[in-house]
Image (cartoon, grey):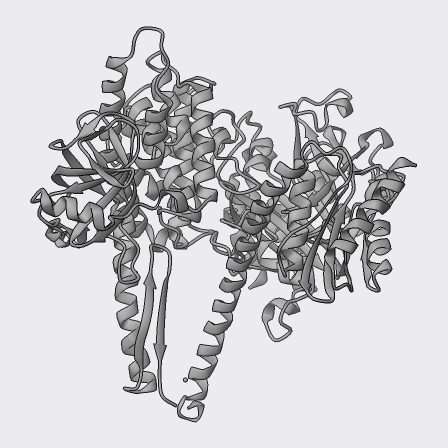
């Protein structure tokens, strides 16, 4: 049976199989795997399919005791620091950190192999804007990886990687170069000479074993978390030369092919490094790049992972074929086939285009793909949806959810494409009207470009592309100013933009005989072919509110519109307002808020052109956000029903909050009696409580970051021109806020000595400080220890950052002594 299975795996006809001198007795399953692998590897590398290359990798490591673990979904599990899973190690972070629940199967893993679905289109690792410009960047890619969790380490990891590349994939040894970590004395990190010696013992010439610093050979996924030195394997595609000087120099012919990370440390919030409980190995090998190397292609898009999609796209578009060049047409091919893979993978894993977070990123990817498909390739509407079966055909065997969810993926893409096309037509008309008004040689108004970006979902690079085709560009300085203003507004939470109708404005409306707003259109939606449809509506401006009073016209700035009718929900009863925009024949009016008072609905908009009473406007509802509100609204009713059924009729609603992304339901009950609640129900509720606690912690961290940013703004105004040490007091009870403020202030004042204090209560003062790198006069730990020790406290830290606690009734005394100490040390 084993021999027959072996012949089937080799896919050899009977005669050919007879000529293969295979042993008739095999001593173990391990031997079977090794033999099968070597036989399958006899084919020339360039003839291997991506499927075979992926399988060869997995089987190589399975034969060496590694357990195959399924790829996790691209939506991170309980990790708010990530928009998407962007590395193979994400699902194994608890193991790497030593915090895995010992009762779970995860804790038993020691050697692992898999191919992980990764998306890098947001956050620290974001390749979205580079996709299409070359042959190697992708928003979705497969990261093949091998892991050791406290089992083997550097020697075994390097040996297995070298064997796989040279003896299985048959990459010539004289075309391979390796790098190792050269150390970083300031961080107390020595050169990784152990790894260097491993490579020398494997036969790599010393001239091909190259040292590099933190940037190239110390791996960390984010600002905090597991990290460590790494060794990379690079391949010279040309060969027959000494390419050592081209390693890590962005040479397209000398590529990094594999990264082997030796996880030894955990990066703390204060940037210090603590040893991990287990020394682990995390290797990452990008499938797309490896396939291009083994198939001897100059671009990933020329491999069998992408070429069937490109050919299908060409058939659908009916235009010029793909040639692999740098031109706009070929860029469009690359963008569309990359993005459709990402869309299919994400939607299959439950991430849909939306209004925030990962959903917003996916929305941008979809709209970018639609734009290139329609405008550049001249493909018909619905092309993206037609490509989904080809994605499933290429990747469905390893990711079967692409096949089982295929129709849902198509429906989601088509629905979101239709919504975008409606916005695209509106935006294109606005661009054309604006261009007609421009004087020759003048720049496109930045305010209009920003409105297109914020309200119609146009990425700014898409706006630039449309304008570039017409020989026009946006005023970059003005756009930067608007972007900065928008960021300031966001940082201020829009507090200054709140606009309401006061008693005086209401009296004026009534004296003018203006009737309350007809909001019946808010509920005029219907289902068509199983989908909700929300028609836009037309309305007339009855009054304008600016500066707290009624006016007849507004030319620029924030103002409120009173209309004869509306289709927007206003914010009331704990439910967030609708999102969307208004438009006239001449301009788009970004919607900042919708409030109601005295029967009148006030639409707060940003005006960049003249509007006046009597004008007609069209109201465009963001259908995605409305659906989210409807679902969360319904969920509060369902939750109320479930609680009453579970806990009895004494459950009473005390409040609720419904937004696009979340809901909150407040209730009270008489006597949450636990003896009446089944044991399994208690476990479910406890798990939900833990989830809520994690969400609360995430929100708290965001609030801390925001508070630190506000403190820094105040401190910068006070100390920016001060040449001495920056020592001051902030109002907080949180050590985390204090340290975050120190870090942000030090970044804003390069080369400065920063110490901040906070009086928690009478008798206790928190302290945190940071000093520049390379300072010999004194360290952060010396400073903190001197200050806190003087006031009967204690402190600790590193040369760069430190924190502690002092005991004092008056923070002023601590402040003065801390500043005096720093000045004396700096004078030396």
Query: At which x and y percent is residue 213?
Result: 78, 36
Left/right placement of residue 480 relative to residue 353 reads: right
- Is residue 201 in sight in this rendering? no
**Of all residues shown, which one is farthest toward the right?**
828
- In which quadrant is the N terminus drawn? bottom right
Query: At which x and y percent is residue 587?
Result: 24, 27
**Of all residues shown, which one is farthest toward the bottom?**
675
Query: At which x and y percent is residue 608?
Result: 29, 27
Left/right placement of residue 559 relative to residue 691 reads: left
Q: Nearer the viewer, residue 467 or 793?
A: 793
Left/right placement of residue 492 relative to residue 89 reads: left
Q: Residue at x 83, y 54 (%)?
A: 787
Looking at the image, residue 694 lies above or below residue 544: below
Query: At which x and y percent is residue 683?
Result: 48, 81
**Quadrant in which residue 16 is drawn:** top right
- In which quadrant is the C terminus drawn? top right
Looking at the image, residue 144 lies above or below residue 177: below
Q: Residue at x 82, y 63 (%)?
A: 793
**How many numbered marks are there?**
0
Left/right placement of residue 593 relative to residue 228 reads: left
Q: Nearer the viewer, residue 338 or 509?
A: 509
- Is residue 161 in sight in this rendering? yes
**Quadrant in which residue 490 is drawn:** top left
Q: Nearer the viewer, residue 657 or 45?
A: 657
Q: Residue at x 81, y 57 (%)?
A: 796
**Quadrant in which residue 319 is drawn:** top left
């Amino acid at each position: 049976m084993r021999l027959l299975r072996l012949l089937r795996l080799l896919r050899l006809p009977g005669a050919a199989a007879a000529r293969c001198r295979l042993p008739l007795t095999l001593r173990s399953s391990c031997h079977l795997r090794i033999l099968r692998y070597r036989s399958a590897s006899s084919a020339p590398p360039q003839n291997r399919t991506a499927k075979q290359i992926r399988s060869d990798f997995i089987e190589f490591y399975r034969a060496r005791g590694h357990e195959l673990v399924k790829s996790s979904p691209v939506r991170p599990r309980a990790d708010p620091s990530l928009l998407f899973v962007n590395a193979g190690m994400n699902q194994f972070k608890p193991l790497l950190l030593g915090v895995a629940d010992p009762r779970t199967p995860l804790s038993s893993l020691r050697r692992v192999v898999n191919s992980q679905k990764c998306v890098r289109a947001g956050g620290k690792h974001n390749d979205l804007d580079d996709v299409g410009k070359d042959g190697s960047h992708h928003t979705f890619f497969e990261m093949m990886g091998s892991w050791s969790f406290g089992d083997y380490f550097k020697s075994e990891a390097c040996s297995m990687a070298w064997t796989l590349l040279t003896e299985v994939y048959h990459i010539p040894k004289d075309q391979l170069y390796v790098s190792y970590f050269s150390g970083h004395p300031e961080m107390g990190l020595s050169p990784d000479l152990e790894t260097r010696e491993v490579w020398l013992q494997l036969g790599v010439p010393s001239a091909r074993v190259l040292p590099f610093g933190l940037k190239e050979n110390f791996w960390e996924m984010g600002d905090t978390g597991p990290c460590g030195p790494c060794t990379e394997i690079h391949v010279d595609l040309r060969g027959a030369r000494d390419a050592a000087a081209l390693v890590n120099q962005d040479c397209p012919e000398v590529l990094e092919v594999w990264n082997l990370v030796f996880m030894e440390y955990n990066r703390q919030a204060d940037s210090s490094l603590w040893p991990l409980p287990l020394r682990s190995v995390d290797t990452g090998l990008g499938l797309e790049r490896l396939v291009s190397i083994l198939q001897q292609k100059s671009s990933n898009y020329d491999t069998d992972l992408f070429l069937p999609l490109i050919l299908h796209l060409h058939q659908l578009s009916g235009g010029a074929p793909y040639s692999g060049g740098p031109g706009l047409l070929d860029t469009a091919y690359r963008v569309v086939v990359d993005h459709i893979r990402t869309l299919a993978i994400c939607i299959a894993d439950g991430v849909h285009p939306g209004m925030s977070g990962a959903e917003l990123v996916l929305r941008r990817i979809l709209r970018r793909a639609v734009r290139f498909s329609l405008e550049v390739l001249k493909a018909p509407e619905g092309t993206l949806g037609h490509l989904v079966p080809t994605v499933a055909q290429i990747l469905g065997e390893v990711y079967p959810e692409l096949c089982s969810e295929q129709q849902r993926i198509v429906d989601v893409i088509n629905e979101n494409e239709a919504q975008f096309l409606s916005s695209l037509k509106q935006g294109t008309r606005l661009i054309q009207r604006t261009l007609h008004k421009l004087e020759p040689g003048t720049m496109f108004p930045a305010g209009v470009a920003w409105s297109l970006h914020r309200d119609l979902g146009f990425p700014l690079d898409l706006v630039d592309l449309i304008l570039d085709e017409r020989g026009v560009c946006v005023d970059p300085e003005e756009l930067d100013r608007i972007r900065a203003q928008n960021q300031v507004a966001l940082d201020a939470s829009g507090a200054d933009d709140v606009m309401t109708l006061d008693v005086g404005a209401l009296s004026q409306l009534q004296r003018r005989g203006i009737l309350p707003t007809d909001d019946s259109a808010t509920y005029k939606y219907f289902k068509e072919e199983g989908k909700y449809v929300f028609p836009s509506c037309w309305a007339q401006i009855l009054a304008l509110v600016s500066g707290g009073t009624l006016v007849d016209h507004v030319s620029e700035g924030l103002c409120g519109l009173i209309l004869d009718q509306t289709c927007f929900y206003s914010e009331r009863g704990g439910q967030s307002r609708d999102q969307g925009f208004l438009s006239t024949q001449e301009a788009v009016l970004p919607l900042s808020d919708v409030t109601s008072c005295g029967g009148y609905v006030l639409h707060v908009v940003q005006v960049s052109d003249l509007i006046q009473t009597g004008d007609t406007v069209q109201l465009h509802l963001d259908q995605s956000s409305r659906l989210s509100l409807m679902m969360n609204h319904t969920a509060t009713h369902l939750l109320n029903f479930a609680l009453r059924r579970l806990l009895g009729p004494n459950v009473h609603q005390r409040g609720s909050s419904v937004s696009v992304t979340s809901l909150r339901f407040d209730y009270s009950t008489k006597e949450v009696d636990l003896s009446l609640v089944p044991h399994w129900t208690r476990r479910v509720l406890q798990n939900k409580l833990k989830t809520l606690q994690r969400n609360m912690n995430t929100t708290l961290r965001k609030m801390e970051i925001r508070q630190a940013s506000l403190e820094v703004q105040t401190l910068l105004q006070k100390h920016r021109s001060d040449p001495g040490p920056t020592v001051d007091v902030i109002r907080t009870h949180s050590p985390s806020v204090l340290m975050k403020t120190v870090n942000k202030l030090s970044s804003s004042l390069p080369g400065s000595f920063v110490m901040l204090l906070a009086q928690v209560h009478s008798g206790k003062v928190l302290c945190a400080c940071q000093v520049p790198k390379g300072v010999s006069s004194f360290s952060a730990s010396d400073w903190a220890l001197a200050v806190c020790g003087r006031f009967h406290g204690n402190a600790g830290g590193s040369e760069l950052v430190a924190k502690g606690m002092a005991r004092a009734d008056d923070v002023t005394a601590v402040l003065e002594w801390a500043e005096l100490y720093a000045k004396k040390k700096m004078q030396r």
